[in-house]
Image (spheres, grey):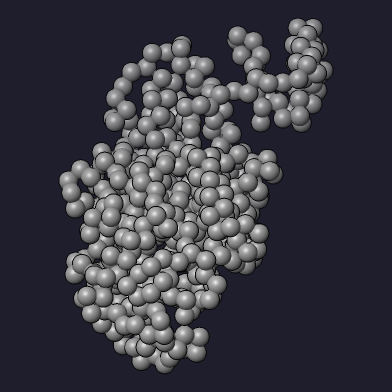
Amino acid sequence: MALRMFNTLGREIKEIVPLEKGRIKMYVCGPTVYRYAHIGNLRTYLMEDILRRVLEMDGYEVTYVMNITDVGHLSDDADEGEDKMLKGAREQGLSVREIAEFYAKIFFEDLEALNIIKPTITCKATEHIQDMIDLIKRIEENGYTYFSGGNLYFDISKFPDYGKLALLDLSELKAGSRIAIDENKKNPHDFVLWFTRSKFEHQTMLWDSPWGKGYPGWHIECSAMSMKYLGEQFDIHCGGIDLIPVHHTNEIAQSEAATGKKWVKYWIHGEFLNTPKGKMSKSEGNFHTLKDLMEKGYEPLDYRYFCLLGHYRSQLQFSLESLDSARNARKNLCLRIALLKQEEGNNSGTGDVEEVDYYRLFKSHAYDDLNMPQCLSDLWNLVKDTTLSSSLKLKVIGKMDTVLGLNLEKAEIDTDIDDEIKASIERREQARKNRDFTLADSIRDELKQLGIILEDTPDGVRWRKI
């Protein structure tokens, strides 16, 4: 059984065969830290976390690198607008460094709350400027650049494979006329490798370079930092589908222009999270943050469960009603697992987890392009099965949760109830002893309305919260 993933480069399902046996080198595009990440962004990081977990389940050693963009990302991905970091700093009355540190901290707190495993390496753009300059020099030496209006541009006409990831037609791109916003470009799709003051008069973050004092374009950072930590060729590059037509397309062009080698073997992209108003977007003000959801009473793992209900390559429709359903399902799942723990001491079931059909199905679905909705179904079928011992079920659940990341081993029955509810439970027990079943049923119904479910067992009454 081998992991198979949809490779955007070629648009087909491919078996993952690493460049180096037993090891996967993986790079993901991290956040531009000028605002809170919204839950649509976080869906992509959840997908990447699931991929990492499946690879590790398959026995690979995974080196997982994530960048932090704290300079150079303009408000328009095609080199127009202003630097997002400067824009955020101006709007919030803080320095760029303060903005970056504050939102990076919040971002990693969000990842931790969602039980996303920390990257092996996290790298900031501002700490790798020299690496970017060195890579740009290689691109220039290989004849892929031109200097115009004070900025150094990548000439896409010199790179015949430009647009292969996004399936762009290079002949049509080259036929395009100049664009009014940046008349220094030979082609509208050429992109800046290094900016100078000639383009932005008030840029505060500037570095010396062979092309003048300035700062790097957004795209070059990912090429430079991925190569620094993973080498000139590596296995997997991930991100959201919105990065395909510009950012990832430009990354490929500049990287392969520098090295003359195929850069990345597999490109894996996650789809959008939508709302009734369309794609979740910071620029449109149409988004929720994880903090927003928590303030409404949801737990971060409710959102993780919600994302597992949709395939990463399918658009997922978000609403508070759908999140309610996910929360209820997760709570019900945790309750069932907590009850299994109570039963575990009463049986000594044995068996090989790898031989349990539910686990074999789970692995086959995980290896089938991360089919998490089906993996969740396998988990539920296991929990509901009455033929396996509680002990064996818990072992299988533990293995499944190494991929799902729902912290199911911490599932427990909530025993925190107030004195009034305890008194009602005792009154019902007394009513049953007195064979006043009408009163007993009435109290039971009242407690259900308060979110308390009673279960009569040979060992006495048990209760749980809905």
Most foreground residue, 325 or 459: 325
- In the image, residue 407 lies at what x, y percent? 48, 32
Most foreground residue, 193 or 421: 193
Q: Residue at x 57, y 53 (%)?
A: 98
- In the image, residue 109 sits, relative to residue 460, either above or below, namely below
Horizontal side of 247 relative to 98 (left or right) equals left
Most foreground residue, 367 or 70: 70
Residue 249 is at least partly visible in this image: no
Residue 394 is at least partly visible in this image: yes
Q: Residue at x 22, y 58 (%)?
A: 233
- In the image, residue 153 lies at what x, y percent? 35, 79
- In the image, residue 332 lies at what x, y percent? 58, 33
Horizontal side of 189 relative to 2 (left or right) equals right
Q: Residue at x 37, y 17 (%)?
A: 349
Most foreground residue, 226 or 340: 226
- In the image, residue 173 sits, relative to residue 131, either above or below, namely below
Residue 62 figure quarter: top left
- In the image, residue 304 sits, relative to residue 414, either above or below, namely below
Q: Residue at x 57, y 49 (%)?
A: 102
Residue 465 figure quarter: top right
Quadrant holding the C terminus:
top right
